[in-house]
Amino acid sequence: MELILKKDVENLGFKDDVVTVRNGYGRNFLIPQGHAILATISAKKVLAENLKQRAYKEKKIIDDAQKVADQLKDVEIKISAKAGSGNKLFGSVSNADLSEAIQKEANLSINKKYISILGGNVKVAGPYEATIRLHREVIVNFPFEVIAEAK
C-alpha cells in the first residue's frame, strides 16, 4: 500500500514522503491516526505542487539547521554522573540528559526526541557518540563523554 505521510513517523519516514507499507499497518494505524493518506494520482500531484512551493522556505530552514550544526561541532560536553566500581553508573545518562547539557553548555535548545545515543542509554562512564537530527537533511554525529564523579 502506497501512502503519503502527513507527519514524521519514526523508523518509516518524514512528513510528505511517499512510502510503501503493509496494508494492515496503513489501513489500521497510519490512516486512522492521521499520520498518512492514500497516495492516489491526484494526491501525488497536489504533493508535488506543495513541495515545489515549499522549496524556497525549506532552503532557509536547512541553512539555519546547518548553522546550529556548525555551532555543535565546537561544543565539548562532559556529563558527570555518580558511579560505583568499574565506572558503572548509578542509573543512566539518556538523551534528555544530553539535551539539558547542550542547553547549559552551548545555549542551544535541541528537543530530546531528535537525539539518539548509539546503544541506548549510557550505563558506564566513557566516551560516547550521539546522532542529532536537526533536519531531515542535516544530521550531526555528536561526541560526548560521561565521567564518573569523584567519591
Image (tube, grey):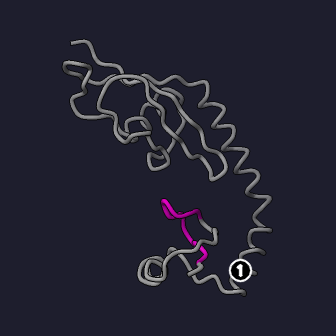
- Which quarter of the image is occupied by the N terminus? bottom right
Is residue 26 toward the left or the right of residue 48 in the image?
A: left
- Percent across and percent down for residue 139 are 61, 43
User: Residue at (47%, 44%) from the top-left corner?
Assistant: 115
Image quadrant holding the C terminus, namely top left
Please determine whether, in this image, residue 145 is positioned above or below residue 48. above
Instruction: Decide: few, some or many residues near mark 1? Use Cα within 10 Å; few <14, some 14-19, many ≥20.
Output: some
Please report the residue visible at 75 percent of the width from the left and 50 percent of the height from the top.
Answer: 60
Residue 81 or 18: which is nearer the viewer? Answer: 18
Residue closest to the far top: 150
The magenta stretch spans residue 10? yes
Q: Residue at x 21, y 29 (%)?
A: 90
Residue drawn 53% across the image and 33% down it: 142
Which residue is at the far front?
22
- In this rendering, would 124 be left or right of 74? left
- Residue, disc 1: 44
Q: Percent from the top left, x then y, of residue 37?
A: 57, 81
Q: Is residue 11 magenta?
A: yes
Determine whether 147 is above or below 92 in the image. above
Please, what is the dominant secondary structure of the magenta stretch? Answer: loop
**Residues rendered magenta in the picture:** 3-14
Specify the quadrant of the image occupied by residue 149.
Answer: top left
Amino acid, disc 1: Lys
Describe residue 41's horizontal placement relative to residue 1 as left or right.
Answer: right
Residue 19, how many percent across, how many down? 59, 71
The answer to whether residue 117 is above or below residue 23 is above
Which residue is nearer to you in this view: 74 or 144? Answer: 144
Provide residue 102's location: percent of width, then percent of height. Answer: 48, 32
